Amino acid sequence: MTEKLIEKYAEMRIKPYRKDSEYSYTCGVFPTIELLKRKPQYVIRVAMSSESDKSRGSDIVRELAKENGIPVVTDDKTIERIAAKDNCLCAGVFLKYEEEIRQDTDHIVLVNPSDMGNIGTIIRTSSAFGFEDLAVITPACDIFDPKAVRASMGALFGIRVKLFASFEEYLKTPHRGSQRHIYPFMLKGEKLTRQIADEAVAMSKEGEHFTLVFGNESRGLDDSYLDIGRPLLIPIRDTVDSLNLPVAVSIGEYMFSAKGEKK
Amino acid sequence: MTEKLIEKYAEMRIKPYRKDSEYSYTCGVFPTIELLKRKPQYVIRVAMSSESDKSRGSDIVRELAKENGIPVVTDDKTIERIAAKDNCLCAGVFLKYEEEIRQDTDHIVLVNPSDMGNIGTIIRTSSAFGFEDLAVITPACDIFDPKAVRASMGALFGIRVKLFASFEEYLKTPHRGSQRHIYPFMLKGEKLTRQIADEAVAMSKEGEHFTLVFGNESRGLDDSYLDIGRPLLIPIRDTVDSLNLPVAVSIGEYMFSAKGEKK
């Protein structure tokens, strides 16, 4: 951060999060370490609880903050104000940022996700399975809400997330290339098989990357997605009408990262 | 239900849920339909919002209740009292019940799950992938809490759930047979491959059923499970320290139901 910004935020009273806030925060040692490791340039301040010595990780937090010239203050009031009911020994306050997604990678696209816990869980799983570029089609829930940050366990800071006003906008991104393979997940799709996933993974290794697309929690993807790419269905019994969104995404990601394969 | 019980509950004022309540309730049309289809014998009453005609499913609710001699009352006050902030057109009030799990099926065991949303999501996914017998090792969160019922989308009523005081108690259940194969999911386990899962599915078809075991959200399974069965790991990158519990269970269930296989 520039000197000017550091000065601006040095004395600022950190308020509870709102969607239009300039900054958000991590809550807890593990996500704060991830924040300081991956996105130190956006961190305004680290607030520590007076009980933070209870956690072994708090030394790592102090070390990383020091390396990056980030002020660390012991400040129970701020922690109490922003952590609500959660038990929180340490909070990293950071400016919200925008990023570009890379074009030479496989993508996940979420169309109008509405639940902050879900999007955080999806970010955590995406990072776990090596998907580092996430496009979110708006309207969507706020990826920087502390609830989403918390559910991501800090994985938010290790992947690239970009918002698009529509799926068409996403498709227009430069250098997408004609060779990107799109797989919308929907109830009217073709049954997902290992063969389909393995072929996509093999093509990705040759530079023809793929995109997995998932719809909103209640509505899924509308029929217009039947004409885009190769629509796929995760087969389930008729005792439930659909899978939970993070579950569906995780199974897609697991299959399309060729996990479970003998290697 | 017996006449006596119907009488007892006919006029009872339905209170907000507590862990020691005799009864719990569904919130919403879809889970209430599942309740009335699968467990009508435990249903005390159906409460409808005066706006319930907005939902097409409310006719099905009335029909199912009538078939089973269950009183249906239009009662906005009860709905408001029990639904908290949720939008809820219809609630099915049911007595909490206990069930045995079957021994001639594959099982899921959850050791000390602590989050009600998670256990509900796991029940929904288990039903989706055909796992109908769930053992829960206590202490654990309350499977009948309305939050768990809601996250299960009513799938709770279509599967069998039994609580055990310890994993040893679960292993002692009669007729388990020596041929049950146990797979604890843990970070120190062997990498899960398609071959391992496919072999287990093949053995299950021959009558040698399997059990997938998952630990608590924060702690996972302790090292004592390394000596039980064949411990497995879902491989992930080191950017996150673990998978979200419902995500881990869903990948295990997906792989061990041989989904994604050409059939």
Image (spheres, coloured by chain):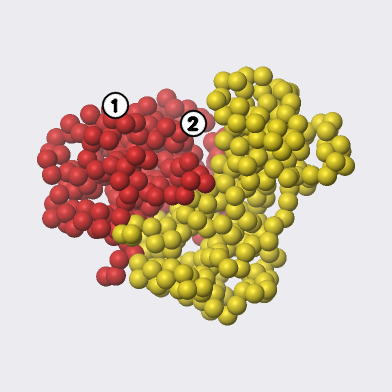
Chain colours: A red, B yellow
- The kind of residue tagged 2 is Tyr
Which mark is drawn over residue A17? 2
Q: Nearer the viewer, residue A124 or A18?
A: A124
Residue B100 lies left or right of residue A90; in this view the side is right
* Residue drawn at the location 22% of the way across and 40% of the way down: A229
Q: Secondary structure at mark 2?
A: loop
How many marks are shown on the rendered structure?
2
| B91 or A103, nearer to the observer | B91
Residue furthest out toward the front: B67
In the rendered structure, which disc, 1 or 2, sits on the residue that comes first in sequence?
Answer: 2
User: Within the image, what quadrant is residue A78 found in?
Assistant: top right
Residue A18: x %, y % from top left: 47, 27
Q: Where the C terminus of chain B falls, by quadrant?
A: bottom left
Residue B169 visible in the snapshot: yes
**Residue B5 horizontal/vertical position (percent):** 84, 42
Could you say which quadrant of the image residue B191 lies in? bottom left
Q: Residue at x 46, y 30 (%)?
A: A12
Q: Give the chain letter at badge 1.
A: A
Q: Quadrant of the N terminus of chain B?
A: top right
**Amino acid identity at mark 1:** Ala
